[in-house]
Image (tube, helix red, strand yellow):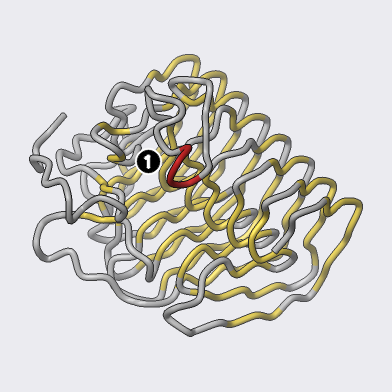
Amino acid sequence: MNLGEVKNLTVQNVDIRCENTFSMAIGGVVGYNMGLIHDVTLTGTNQIAGVNATGGIAGGSMQSVWNCTVDGTVIYVLGDNDFSSGRIIQADIAECGGLVVGGFFGGTIDNCTARGTVMAEGNEPVGLGGIAGCLEMMDSITNCTAEVEIISEKGGHAMGGLCGFCGTHSIGDVALATEDIQSSVYPGMIENCHVTASMSVPGATHVGGLVGTGLYYYGEETAFKVANCTVNAEITGAVTPGAVAGRAVNSVIESCDAQVMLDGEALTSAIGETSTMYESGDQFEEETPADDAA
């Protein structure tokens, strides 16, 4: 766990595999970041595998990361989920894989570059992305570039070339008491990010060239604003994906150039038609929202 500052560091040839289903936050440099990470490079040949929040630089983060580079890296997301009940709920297994960070919750990310592969081996993983699986409750996601191959051969949900899910809540301190997280920008800003992605995700939902979806969290779906971003992607097998976002309730997309192919045909819809919400695992026993809420 990082409570201080990690900076000006190059790490190479990392090989980590953590199969314990109770494990969380598996990173090539830092497990869980509660401080600052900047000017860190992960290079060489790297393989990092875990079941929950698995990333190249950090497994999980709730603070700021900037000026980081990841190259030559494969992130493996392990484990199986079962959403046969019809509800898609944030899980603690097969969740959140990204080349820079597995799961971000709070903080900011700026000027990070990533190239590599995010691969899920099990059933219905959630939260896969080029920069991070989760970029949730973050005021700003800026100036990031990802060149990523995302592979999930057994379905899944919340997948995007930049991130699987993201956004902020309209009440910025809604998670202050429970998660020690506060945001001040609504919708959360995604600006000047550029993605090149190949996504082989047969049967997956909540899939977007840039962003998968927001998260149903404390009574509403978190929202994001996309501005001045570019997407070049090839998606195969996804169910009702969007060229920019798989689902984007209350979100804004502007000045975004998306050139995306779906199963060999041009995907012209910026936002997918996914009707089922992607839900937080913190509340699902307390709340039962309608699956068709928009």
Residue at the disc numbered 1: 208
Locate residue 118 relative to residue 294 in the image: left or right: right
- Residue 244 picture location, percent across and down: 40, 32
On screen, 48 above or below 289?
A: below
**Image quadrant assignment for residue 125:** bottom left
Report the amino acid beneath label 1. Gly
**The furthest residue to the front:** 177
Locate residue 222 relative to residue 69 in the image: left or right: left
Q: Which quadrant holds the C terminus?
A: top left
Q: Secondary structure at mark 1?
A: strand
Residue closest to the eye, 223 or 12: 223
On screen, 6 above or below 53?
A: above
**Image quadrant assignment for residue 271:** top left
Please report the residue visible at 37 percent of the width from the left and 71 percent of the height from the top.
93
Residue closest to the eye, 74 or 137: 137
Please report the residue visible at 45 percent of the width from the left and 32 percent of the height from the top.
259
- Residue 164 picture location, percent across and down: 42, 48
Residue closest to the eye, 177 or 150: 177
Locate residue 69 relative to residue 204 in the image: left or right: right
> Crowdedness of circle 1 by 10 Å Cα count: few (<14), some, many (20+)?
many
**Image quadrant assignment for residue 240:** top left
Please report the residue visible at 64 percent of the width from the left and 36 percent of the height from the top.
108
